[in-house]
Image (spheres, rainbow, N blue to C red):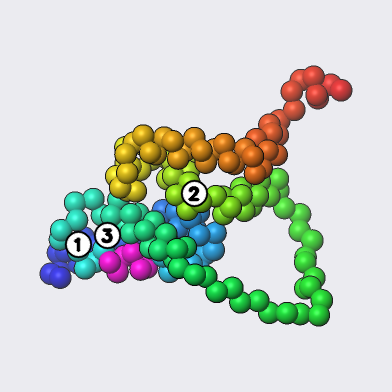
Amino acid sequence: MDAQAEGEFREFVEARSLALRRTAYALTGDPHQAEDLVQAALVKLVRRWHRVDNPEAYVRRIMYHDLASRWRRRRIVREDAVAEPPDRPVTDAADAVLHRLDLTQVLLRLSPGQRAVLVLRFYEDLPEREIAEILRCSVGTVRSQTSRALARLRTLAPELAADPVPTPEEASA
């Protein structure tokens, strides 16, 4: 890689790595796995830097496909048995933090495709057409996956749909 291409790549990584890590975290639910996912995708990108027209879309596509490949492989879950569960600290967490944690847990219960569509659509705020490009599917598929994922979210966690702000009638009661 020549010096100019290396500089362009460095600029891209500096400008977009935080957004890519956020997306990866939303997909994996684990900060360490998210970092690994982004790093692996960037390694694949640097090999094809001269041939890629839209590097961000390329990296996102790599992240999605790499993660889907991991899900397809048989997972080995390792657990450590302990006599007593560890104490959990009591924290004064804000409702918004709890809401995000609940949402993250529910997202992890969706299929990889549904999760990817929701993360790209609502977390990354990408248009349906760009999501279709990233996931290599039609816009219609993105729409149907979004609809199915939202319906599943409503089933899995109806409490997340509740309006936290009371109506005037509720407030006066």
Q: Amino acid at mark 2?
A: Arg
Comes first in the chain, label 1 or label 3: 3
Comes first in the chain, label 2 or label 3: 3
Q: Eyeballing the image, is 87 above or below 125?
A: below
> Given this view, does label 2 or label 1 mark the residue nearer the observer?
2
**Residue 32 falls inside the magenta stretch:** no
Q: Eyeballing the image, is 153 above or below 81?
A: above
Q: Which residue is mark 3?
A: 11
Q: Which residue is mark 1?
A: 49
Q: Amino acid at mark 1?
A: Trp
> Given this view, does label 1 or label 3 mark the residue nearer the observer?
1
Tell me residue 156's x, y (percent): 65, 44
Q: Compute the Cα span from label 2 to label 3.
A: 29 Å
> Given this view, does label 2 or label 3 mark the residue nearer the observer?
2
133 displayed left or right of 78: left
Q: Compute the Cα span from label 1 to label 3.
A: 13 Å
Comes first in the chain, label 2 or label 1: 1
Mark 1 lies on a secondary structure that is helix
Q: Which residue is mark 2?
A: 115
Q: Residues within 10 Å of mark 3 (few under 14, many from 20)?
A: few
Q: Residues within 10 Å of mark 1 (few under 14, many from 20)?
A: some
Residue displayed at 15% across by 61% down: 50
